Amino acid sequence: LRPTNYPSSSASPSIKPTTSNNPTISDAPTKYPSSSVSPSCGGSLMMIQIQYDSYPEETSYKLEKIASEDGQETELASHSGSRGDKNHKESICLEDGLYSFTFYDSYGDGFNGEYSLTLVPGERITTRDNSVSPHGERVLFRLPFDRE
């Protein structure tokens, strides 16, 4: 399955981010990774990497698994930057399913750094560089991915 970005209020795809006061859906990734199963974790190992802008304390994210039967979200990881932070890296083992990654800028002036979600050994889910809408964005993706 391809990674698909859906607005939280609808099941139809949305491609372009907007500049509303709510996190928005990011563009679909340009590469559709194949299934990457890490034997050490028993699932897909995903790396979250952030290169902060000048105000890391305004930056946070939340990774959630969405239960397909009822849409309920379970938080798997979250992080908030602190003053003086330059970079953040985190790896997490994910089983098959639907996931939501929400990236926030609390001040609302936009994020001017870079972040990426990558499956080990390097297959990209998404990468953002100076293009996050003022208050953030939300990326939905499903594991496993199939190569086209």
Image (cartoon, rainbow, N blue to C red):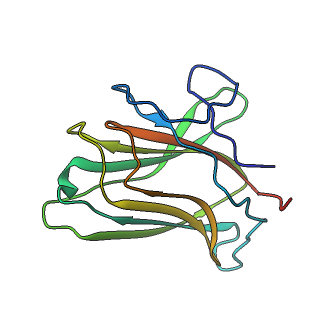
Q: Is residue 140 above or below residue 50?
A: above
Which quadrant is home to the C terminus?
Answer: bottom right
User: Residue drawn 30% across and 70% down?
Assistant: 87
User: Residue drawn 17% across and 55% down?
Assistant: 55
Q: Residue pushed farthest left?
A: 83
Q: Is residue 138 left or right of residue 69?
A: left
Q: Residue pushed farthest top?
A: 9
Q: Is residue 28 left or right of residue 146?
A: left
Q: Residue 112's spot in the image, x, y percent?
A: 30, 54
Q: Residue 39's spot in the image, x, y percent?
A: 71, 79
User: Residue drawn 64% across and 73% down?
Assistant: 41
User: Residue drawn 68% across and 58% down?
Assistant: 95
Write down the quadrant of residue 18 in the picture.
Answer: top left
* Total number of numbered discs in the rendering: 0
Q: Is residue 90 above or below residue 59?
A: below
Q: Is residue 143 left or right of residue 113?
A: right
Write down the quadrant of residue 119 in the picture.
Answer: bottom right
Q: Is residue 93 left or right of residue 80?
A: right
Question: Which residue is more in the foreground, 27 or 86?
Answer: 27
Q: Residue 62's spot in the image, x, y percent?
A: 42, 47
Q: Residue 51's spot in the image, x, y percent?
A: 33, 67
Question: Which residue is more in the foreground, 76 or 35?
Answer: 35
